[in-house]
Image (cartoon, rainbow, N blue to C red):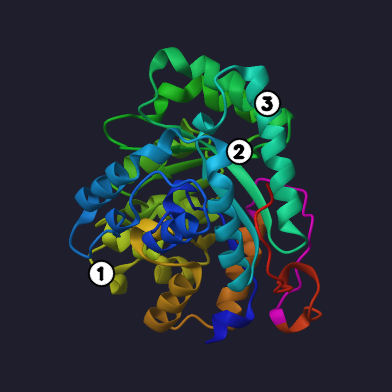
């Protein structure tokens, strides 16, 4: 398939969402710490929608408060899968709860985490991180999370933040102060909007949230004026096709607005969201888009270029070739060398 020849960039994936039964079984067999029974971790069914995702989240609940060391073998496995799929740059959303509440201790442990990540990249796939902030974050914790995100960014631990959660119940206006302060410190802002809410939530993400990127953005396509604004302002949209269908944001893949976005010259990427929860990987998402909408190699190269330009970490450690064929075998981000998690 034509997408296989083009390097890939992923901007919208949750670290906890990588978990699946096969991975957890492999970790247990290797003597790694696992927090749930693998057979309990079943993906969201085609007709389960948001209820199915809530069930999946409940199943993996112990991982929500797990520390960063627990996640190292998970991340190691994920990096291997990304490399196999020709991914050269990826941003993952991580919970600040992975690190101690004490800020000084958190920064120290974040530095250890980042050192491990860079050692295990080995010139193949560059991994960067966004701090995931839930819309439901209690008001009294917002200021401390602002300080935490700034400290994490100054330590080169994160390059941006992501706001996720139920849109209509928790408006982004609660975080107005956070958005301005983090923008002043050079952090990128990604906001999940237009997945379960309407066009108004996308507008608020732009006007109040100062969003550089919109996660999902499906509801924006109900409003032609908003679509024009997103295009004219070159706002990057992170589409997650299988997630968008399974969560009910679109009724079936043929109705996904990604084809309209391509035809309208919009700025977007293709992502997995929660590959463990939705039983997909990046190759699957690209394949579905290619088969359903006839995307060609030029389309996929444009997607790769736009996604790389929309990244929040401006420093590229491993500048990618424009195609897999241009990459010297055995070197750079496409060198398929096995690697194992370090202690």
> Against 89, is 298 above or below?
below
Helix, strand or loop for disc 3: helix
Pointers 2 and 1 in contact (CB under 8 A)?
no
Residue 75 location (% of width, % of height): 57, 52
User: What residue is at 29 percent from the left and 49 percent from the top?
Assistant: 56
Q: Earlier in the sequence, mark 1 or mark 3?
A: 3
Q: Nearer the viewer, mark 3 or mark 2?
A: 3
Q: Which residues are magenta?
A: 310-324
Pointers 3 and 2 in contact (CB under 8 A)?
no
Q: CA distance from mark 2 to mark 1?
A: 32 Å
Q: Which mark is residue 107?
A: 3
> Against 318, is 70 above or below?
above
Q: Quadrant of residue 279?
A: bottom left
293 lies left or right of 312: left
Helix, strand or loop for disc 2: strand
Residue 62 location (% of width, % of height): 37, 38
Comparing 203 with 307, the one in front is: 307
Q: Which residue is mark 1?
A: 252
Q: Which mark is residue 160?
A: 2
> Against 177, is 115 above or below?
below
Q: Earlier in the sequence, mark 3 or mark 2?
A: 3
User: What residue is at 54 percent from the left and 20 percent from the top?
Assistant: 101
Q: Is residue 234 visible?
A: no
Q: Residues within 10 Å of mark 1 (few under 14, many from 20)?
A: few
Q: How many marks?
A: 3
User: What residue is at 48 percent from the left and 23 percent from the top?
Assistant: 176
Helix, strand or loop for disc 1: loop
């Amino acid at each position: 398939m034509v997408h296989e020849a083009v390097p890939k960039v992923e901007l919208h994936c949750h670290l906890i969402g990588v978990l699946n039964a096969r991975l957890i079984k492999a970790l247990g067999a290797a003597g790694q710490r696992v927090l749930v029974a693998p057979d309990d971790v079943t993906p969201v069914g085609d007709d389960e929608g948001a209820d199915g995702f809530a069930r999946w989240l409940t199943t993996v609940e112990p991982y929500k408060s797990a520390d960063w060391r627990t996640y190292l073998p998970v991340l190691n496995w994920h990096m291997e899968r990304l490399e196999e799929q020709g991914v050269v740059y990826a941003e993952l959303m991580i919970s600040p709860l992975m690190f101690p509440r004490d800020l000084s201790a958190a920064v120290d442990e974040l530095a250890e985490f980042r050192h491990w990540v860079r050692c295990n990249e080995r010139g193949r796939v560059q991994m960067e991180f966004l701090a995931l902030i839930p819309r439901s974050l209690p008001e009294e914790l917002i200021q401390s999370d602002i300080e935490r995100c700034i400290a994490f960014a100054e330590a080169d631990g994160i390059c941006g933040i992501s706001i996720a959660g139920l849109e209509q119940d928790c408006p982004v206006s609660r975080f107005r102060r956070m958005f301005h302060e983090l923008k002043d410190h050079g952090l990128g802002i990604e906001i999940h909007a237009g997945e379960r809410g309407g066009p108004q939530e996308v507008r608020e993400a732009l006007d109040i949230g100062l969003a550089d990127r919109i996660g999902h953005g499906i509801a924006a396509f109900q409003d032609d004026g908003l679509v024009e604004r997103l295009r004219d302002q070159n706002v990057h949209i992170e589409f997650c096709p299988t997630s968008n269908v399974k969560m009910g944001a679109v009724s079936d893949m043929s109705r996904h607005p990604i084809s309209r976005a391509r035809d309208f010259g919009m700025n977007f990427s293709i992502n997995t969201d929660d590959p463990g929860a939705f039983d997909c990987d990046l190759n699957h998402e690209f394949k579905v888009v290619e088969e359903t909408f006839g995307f060609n190699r030029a389309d996929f190269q444009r997607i790769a270029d736009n996604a790389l330009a929309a990244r929040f970490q401006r420093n590229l450690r491993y500048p990618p070739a424009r195609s897999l064929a241009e990459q010297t075998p055995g070197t750079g981000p496409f060198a398929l060398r096995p690697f194992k998690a370090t202690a």
